[in-house]
Amino acid sequence: MAATVAASSAAATSTAPSVAATFAAPAGVAARPDSTPSPGRRPVGGVGGAGRHGMLEHVTVRAASSVLVGRHRETAALREALGRARAGEPTTVLVGGEAGVGKTRLLEEFAGWATEGAARVLVGQCLELGEAGLPFAPFAAALRAVLRADGPEVFAGYEAEFAPLLPELGRASATLAAPRVVPLSDAPRGYLFDLVAELFQRLADARPLVLIIEDLHWADRSTRDLIGFLVRAARPGRLLLVCTYRTDELQRGHPLRPFLAELDRARGVERVELGRLDRDGTAAILADLLGAEPLARAVDDVHDRTQGNPFFIEELTVAGDPIGCAALPETLRDLLLARVDRLPEPTQRVLRIAAAGGTRFAHDLLAEVAGLPEAELEDALRAAVAAQLVVADRDGDYEFRHALVREAVHDELLPGEHARLHARFAAAIEAQPHLVAAGRAPAEIAHHWYAAHDHPRALVAARAAAGAAADRYAYAEQRRLLERALELWELVPDAADLLGMDHLALLEQTLDAAVTAGDFSRAITLTRAGLAEVDADAAPLRAARLLDQRGRLMALLGKSDGSRELDEAYRLAAGGPPGAERVRLLADIATHLVKIDPQKAARVAAEAATDAEAFGVNVALLSTRIALLCHGERDLTGGLAELGQAAAAARAAGDAPTLVLAMVFESDMLCELGRYAESAQAAEAGVAEARRVGISRSTGAYLLSNRAEALIALGRWDEAEAVCAEAARIDLSGVTGLHWLQLGAGLRLARAHPGADELVDRALTFLGRPYLWPNHRLPLHELAIEAALAADDKIEAVRAARVAVADESLPQLPREGWPVLSAAARTAARVGDRELAAAVAALATDLPARHPAARAHAAQVTALLTVGDQALPAWRAAVDAWRADGQPYPLGRALLALAETTAAAGERDETAAAVTEATEIGRRLGAAPLVEAAATLARRVGLRGAAGGGAGAALLTAREREVLRLVAEGHSNSRIAERLFISPKTASVHVSRIIAKLGVTNRVEAAALAHRLGLLTEAAGPR
């Protein structure tokens, strides 16, 4: 599940729209010149793009992000500052950040909020003209807005004195009465400052005033002096002064640096620094630009290249496919290189050399490669640091301030220069590995020889670097390096001699790395290549291993059950030479067979265990590999004991993958046994171990979803959502990502999350795959039923329930089968479908219920299908069963059903107690539909206070309270969307949820209840 993350979107560079552009109507201020198209949609490939291809092909991309996805701390600081200004305390906020980090976008959002709160917003823009530029330019822009909105009368007869700021006032005053005593040209500057301060005071007396001055780094001396006067001397009340500046423009000697230091000493001045976005912030902007959830690989690549700068994110995304080696848009390249071009040529030359070394480089390494005198090198670096293009760290190393600056400089290298520099870096690191970070030398050497087009050296270096990556459990890096070695193999005639292996061996290593890294799509392609190359007669175990891997991958990717490949793998392995290799291969085949043919899996497992003793293979470790057999007819408690022995043996042997596998099964069994807290702890420990050894995207993926499942059962839903978000960031391949997706979708349904439909749809698309393991397929049937019931789509609920109960695997899987039967029984009871009820009852009769959750579901199914006098004891039994199991959410739902039954039986006290407890559970979990259902039932049966007066109101989020205020003001969904910078569809979802939470039937009733409960005053904020 994708997390909702704070981040800022649009950029605040000279090409970005200003706050003035957005608020031109109320403030009357002209927008700054802007070459960027207005927000909306434009086809991909414009602005220097070469046309979209790859994973973003045919995607229409928004030209600029339309959302502010966070900046909560900065927004709160600005709102608090306005609150202080409203109270009469003069307040100044200095907003700093590098170009493109989102200063303008932040102020657009804040200005909109301030305007809605009855404040007046004026905006002025400093011009890029330097110290000799137009004096008072931002104040002139702001006052011109005042003149247009209020007319010359607002200047209270001092039009001539204001003429130095607004020449049109001088022309107007010349047509009026006799000139004033003080000539226009003789008005002292201090007098003018006083008049400006008095004007702002008059405006602020009418309503709070927000004066925004953008790009203070371009301010002229006069502008800085007037700002200093307003901050330190005049200090008009009810005025909030907000100034933005670029931190990366403040080179040594810049006049703004001492000015900011002076302002810092003044009372009421606060600094707000905007940093770059984290990965989740980058993902949020990409999602808004693309109109769909981006792939995790796309997010990683864009975030690595842009380092979280919103402007760069937008430019890369709009101009072309930002994945892999997509070229920089020309407009962005020119922008990045403009500051480089202003540097002295020796500094530019050093930057070109450094760019070949990477985003981060050590001084000693650069000196070795550059071959320059130390003084000359230091002078060049000093100029680069002063220009804010390179930053130095405490360790004496350097880093390009922006990775894209390095990329742009590197792309400017001539072909011969490019190869020569990279060869020099490779040779230097080979001779002195200590010149790079510990453990990085092999990868750096491989990269530079490859970039230098020295194919033999690049091949050997790639293979060596892959081995070093595996030693560090960096399997994704290992796979990339081995893929490079495969690419180079055809270019190096004596590749086999250089590497000491044949091509198939290299391919097998690449396959293993791809599987371990969780890149299953690439892995299955590699199995096909390997099978085309292997001689099964000469090397049966080698061929069998490739077939075993392919069979498992086919199932993991939902292409088939893989049985054909596994059967052939067993045939080859059974006839292969005896030994430890064959034993381990048979154990792997047994593990992969268990979900499709348990009987055959047991026979193969027994064969492997028998041979293991003969060849000295640790049977305890093999039992881990076939531990799924514990989910058959065996006692789970006994299975846990076996797993404990296997885990101990794996620790002793240093076999981390086997240990992680044991922890997967342990956490899963504990959850089935109803020992949810122990399951969550075991899964958490397993996640840490999987992360340590680099298998989070393969075996370790199941530990994340196992932990989420246990946390949901414990009622720790916020933690479960965080775990699902972590799984989403890992970008799991194939069905390894299905479990968390199904859990996250169910969680969102239970909370009526606005994004529930999207996640449900993503999960249910797996049902369209040619094959799914039954233990994955059945929970999706349950999800389909629950989603239809949540949407009150009875026809779809019945259809989904009929498909679910017809699944032939349901009778063999009680753990997954009972929740399906519960959902189907709920559907039958709601729509009165007797045929469906009979089908559920027939299946329930023979389905075992060995463990707490299964017994609770069985009791619930019985209660759902029972009518008449026996319904009440049946529901009491169901509630007792859920109490014994310990899961709060199904307990809350059972309590509501019990309350309806007791109400019909006239048991009013029991009804009130059940409704109250269900309400408390729903509030604690954030399960809005449960709370709403309890409130509705309470009203229907005439209970007062059982569900808590205003229970739904207590669940309103801050955003819903904002929406409710606008509903009360009579705004349509479209107008609400416009005011809150959200889509009309999102506004509609908010309104529907508000109506449901408040237990009313329409917008008018919602507004009336909001007034009665005092919700609107809180939502409105300070005025």
Image: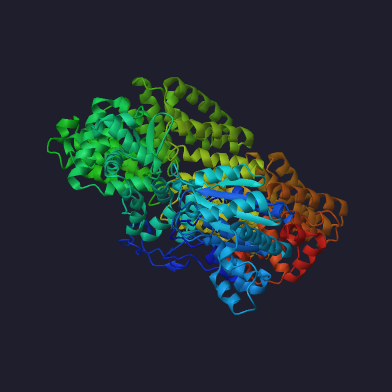
On the picture, is 618 further left or further right than 326?
Answer: right
The picture places residue 377, in percent across and down from the top left corner, at 29, 34
The picture places residue 864, in percent across and down from the top left corner, at 70, 55
Quadrant of the rendered image containing residue 719? top right
| In the rendered image, the vertical position of residue 646 relative to residue 212, given as above or below | above
User: Which residue is outermost to the bottom?
Assistant: 175
The picture places residue 129, in percent across and down from the top left corner, at 43, 58
| The one of 836 and 264 positioned closer to us in this rendering | 264
Q: Is residue 571 visible?
A: no
User: Which residue is outermost to the front?
Assistant: 181
Q: Which residue is drawn at 32% across and 33% down?
A: 378
| The one of 96 and 290 positioned closer to us in this rendering | 96
Q: Is residue 122 visible?
A: yes
Q: Residue at x 40, y 27 (%)?
A: 609
Quadrant of the rendered image containing residue 440? top left
The picture places residue 108, in percent across and down from the top left corner, at 56, 60
Q: Which residue is drawn at 83% across and 59% down?
A: 904
| The one of 315 and 303 positioned closer to us in this rendering | 315
On the picture, is 379 further left or further right than 750?
Answer: left
Quadrant of the rendered image containing residue 936? bottom right
| In the rendered image, the vertical position of residue 165 relative to residue 585, given as above or below | below
